[in-house]
Amino acid sequence: MNISGELVDNCIMIKKARDIGRLYDKSHMGTFHKSGSLQLNLLEGLFLLDEEKMVLFQNKKQVNLSQLLKLAIQQIPDFETKYLVFKDLRKRGHAITLINEDAHVSFREWKTGDTTGPTGSIATFSERDILDIDETKQYIQKFTKKNNALWYALVDEEGDITYYDVSGIALKGDIMEQRYPKGRCILLKNRLIVFDKTLSDLLLQKEFFGKPFGELLQLSFVEALYLLEKDVLEVQTADGTYLSKKKCLDLMQKHQPDIKQRLLVFQDLKQRGLLVKTGFKFGAHFRAYTKQPDKTHAEYLIHVVEKGFTSIWAEISRAVRLAHSVNKEFVFACIDGTTVNYIKLGRLRP
């Protein structure tokens, strides 16, 4: 037998005790009204009508799906995005409830049969919305306390939904920083060459710095700057002129304008015990290993962004899918001043 509801002031009132039990106790739908009735929001009501589980009346006249749909469209911002996510997760057995009709963080999920607390929050986006990294950091801080999850639900123009698990991540590896003898290298246009073979071998073997260049070693800009700060390298031009760190940085910035930001993240990752290499072939700034490369593949693809960063969702979808296709996790390294925080986005199947 269908549930009976009454449409009152843009809400749906459920009065029969049997119906209240089915909705609140079993499905965690609705909130109790001071009258003792169960009050459903328009999304919940529309879902029940859509699934043919409720008969709805207003002033003793039956309200059909089209009539309620028109009302919901008028009353709920970004209605179609929120409803498609609500319907999809409910049909998958997730007891989600609307918490904010206006904000992106629209739903919370409750444990089945447990009304004491939520297990997570869901933010809904259209593919034409923008990812705002500062907003994402705020959501993580606000909604992932006490081990609660934060999901992003992305609805494309055909109504298909992609889900992401969004969280802060404390990256940590077990690679100890080593000491090296001091050596000389020459700055070329796009790389540096270490001319000391002993140093070249040590850098490559112990911390996977650089790549063989004949019997010598070629270093990326960020690797060389890191080793220059550690007083491992002296940098020269091809004509033998020694370069200060500042001069090196100035010359490198002409070819790689974001070198300062990359260096800050590179230093932070090294302090966390990770091996760090370029992620160019994977469309990211870095790939990072928690163990020596002969023991594991790179676990993370790291993309460096600064405070205020925004992106279209198509770019994010491409980056996360590529990371998953090569068995890696996609991580934003978010720079705020001299602080670096890490945010992981991973695809999930609810």
Image (tube, rainbow, N blue to C red):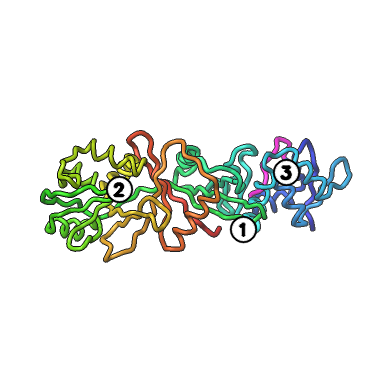
Which residue does the image show at 69% across and 44% down from the upper left?
79
Image coordinates for residue 34, horizontal then vertical, percent:
70, 35
Q: Amino acid at mark 2?
A: Leu
Query: Magenta stretch?
Result: 28-36
Which sits in the foreground, 165 or 244? 244
For the stretch drawn in magenta, what is the main secondary structure? loop
Q: Amino acid at mark 1?
A: Gly
Q: Nearer the viewer, mark 2 or mark 1?
A: 2
Whole-number angstrom distance, CA of label 2 to CA of label 1: 40 Å
Q: Quadrant of the N terminus?
A: bottom right
Mark found first going from the N terminus, 1 or 3: 3
Whole-number angstrom distance, CA of label 1 to CA of label 3: 19 Å
Q: What's the mark number on residue 269?
A: 2
Which sits in the foreground, 160 or 61? 160
Q: Amino acid at mark 3?
A: Leu
Q: What's the mark number on residue 93?
A: 1
Furthest residue toward bottom: 294
Which sits in the foreground, 243 or 172? 243
Decide: marks 3, 2 in contact (CB < 8 A)? no
* Secondary structure category for the residue under label 2: helix
Reading the image, the residue beneath label 3 is 42
